[in-house]
Amino acid sequence: MHELSLVMNILEIAGEQMKAHHAHKLERIELEIGSLAGVEMDAFNFAWEAAVGGTDMAVTEKIIHQIPAKARCLECNLEYSIDHLFSPCPNCGEYLNELLQGKEMRIKSLTKKKKKYNYV
């Protein structure tokens, strides 16, 4: 299950950034994952829960933006949505295309928890 190694890498990067910015807890982590990135989302979510359980990250809100795959036909230049790498162009039927988006796997943002002060 490579999803666990993806989760562990994300948590490692988040930990490094927290240390660099003197943050003790994260409020939110936003991820971008392309539909053709090869990530099984059920397995990813299961691995996430297993990895963060019992840690400070357990209360961190995880937001995943799924990026739909798009390609450009190398024959007629039409841009179109695809479900898999070898989807034919809906305009001319050509199979050769340039992938424009859909293989992303990145941390979009990290938001650290702000301290709350009570004033009497």
Image (cartoon, grey):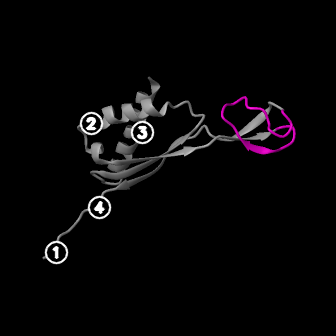
Which percent across, then down, holds residue 39? 51, 32
Marks 3 and 2: which is nearer the front? Answer: 2
10 Å neighbourhood of mark 3: few (<14), some, or many (≥20)?
some
| Residue 89 located left or right of residue 33 | right
What is the span of residues highlighted in magenta in the rendered image? 74-93
How far is disc 3 from disc 4 in space, using C-alphas?
Answer: 21 Å
Residue in the image at 44% along x and 29% along y: 3
**Which amino acid, by three-letter code, is at mark 1?**
Tyr
Residue position for label 3: 10
CA gap, disc 2 to disc 4?
22 Å
Which residue occupies the extreme left position in the image?
A: 120
Taking the spot 27% from the left edge, 36% from the top edge, the residue there is 53
Instruction: Name which of mark 3 and mark 2 comes first in the sequence.
Output: 3
Image position, residue 44 (x, y; %): 43, 33
Q: Position of residue 26 (x, y in %)?
A: 32, 51
Nearest-to-viewer mark from 2 and 4: 2
